[in-house]
Amino acid sequence: MGKISLVSAKYIVHAFIQIDGVVDKPDVIGAIFGQTEGLLGNDLELRELQRSGKIGRIEVNTETKTGRTAGMIVLPSSLDKAETAIVAASLETIQRIGPCNSRVKVEKIEDVRISKRNFVVERAKELLRELTSNVLPDSQEITEEVANNVRMMEVTEYSKERLPAGPNIEENAEIILVEGRADVLNLLKNGIKNVVSINGTNIPDAIVELSKRKTLTLFVDGDRGGDLIIKEALDRLEIDYVTKAPDGKEVEELTKKEIHKALRSRIAVEQAKLDFNGKEKPQSADAEENIRDYRRVQRPQAASEVPARRPYPRTEAAVQSKTELTLRQKQIFKKMLDDLIGTRGAYILDQNLEILGKVPTMELPVTIKSLKNAFAVVFDGVINKDMAMAMDKTSVKYLVAMESRVKEQDGRMLCIGNAELVA
């Protein structure tokens, strides 16, 4: 007798059977063939269909509990849809198996081709992913990979301190100083070879000597650590220019565009000293031009939004003195300022000194304009005249930062630096 397997079937009938008694699997199969015999005519006789290979081996899985038998009937078919449905419906005519009553319910007719099609689709996706991940790179990718590897191999060691550096430092008239080895690698990767690392915050003697012979540009991270390195370099080195990575970023993670933008925005050492010491002034027309460029980049809002400079109005009700700052306010401002160190963020407070929100320092002027109940602002940065004038037109009464360069308290707003909170 020819029988087909589940693999060659087009449809599979799944039927549930419940028997009020204990029977064996052969009894169920016998009842299926016996009670459907002659029911559908010769063309759909189960025995003939199985003999010709149009119906496969009928599987019966049963389990007996508390005197009752229940299970599933699985019937594979290679007939068309209509004939398969008729054969499936004929199973529900089985009402007795041996001496026991029974009930058969067809649960579903599964199209095997749909299951196979779904498998083909999923497997094709996996194969395509493997092909895409293992595909050979194009010529441009190969060129870039080789060039990057060559640049990485160009890292040398400078002086007896073995400082990471680009090739031929002594042959270049201009040198870029960075903080660490990763910064050197990133600049080399982007085609800048005249670079040497100071290897941390302690400036080596070799760099001090180098600063006397070369034109140096100090390129540091855009964080508080970078500010500390600038201060030490201003004291020990004869540097010519200073530049920083964007706020919150490190030199080692900058893109090629960001690196070149930072180097184009470098400022003269005279302006750097003025920014950190607040005493020295630029001594040349070139230095003054660099300062103007620096301020256009660094100020917190666009130049078109900055109002024309005018003296603050002096009214008796508006003028405040530092004695008006209470001990509680000092404590709250000091704690918030400590929390913000190195974050480049700002807290906006209401009259109860409760935090309304936290925003990046660069977004502070725009955010304050949209708030009507802002009473105080505490931020990680420096209060300059541009910032003070921008805040003076808002409802802010206290402006607290790491440092205040606004010496005179002429406006209605009180500008407070960290040193005044601990005094």
Image: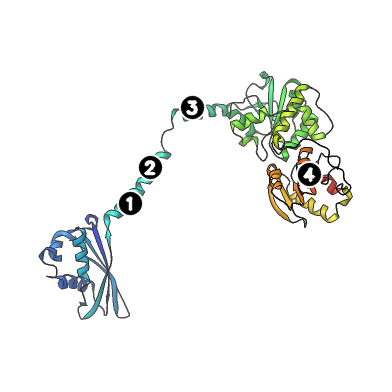
Decide if residue 385 is on the left or right side of residue 145: right
Q: CA distance from mark 1 to mark 4?
A: 68 Å
Q: Earlier in the sequence, mark 1 or mark 2?
A: 1
Residue at image point 74% right, 51% down = 374
Q: Can residue 344 be seen in the rendering of this structure?
A: no
**Image height of 55 relative to 286, above or below:** below
Determine contact: label 2, label 3, CB under 8 Å. no
Q: Residue furthest left?
A: 42
Q: Say which amino acid is labelled 4.
A: Asp
Q: Earlier in the sequence, mark 1 or mark 4?
A: 1
Q: Which residue is mark 1?
A: 119
Q: Earlier in the sequence, mark 4 or mark 3?
A: 3
Q: Which residue is mark 2?
A: 128
Query: Residue 230 location, x and y as percent?
Result: 75, 33
Q: Say which amino acid is labelled 3.
A: Thr
Which quarter of the figure has residue 177? top right
Q: Say which amino acid is labelled 1.
A: Phe
> Dot 1: few (<14), some (14–19), or many (≥20) neighbours within 10 Å?
few
> Dot 2: few (<14), some (14–19), or many (≥20) neighbours within 10 Å?
few
Determine contact: label 4, label 3, CB under 8 Å. no
Which quarter of the figure has residue 387? top right
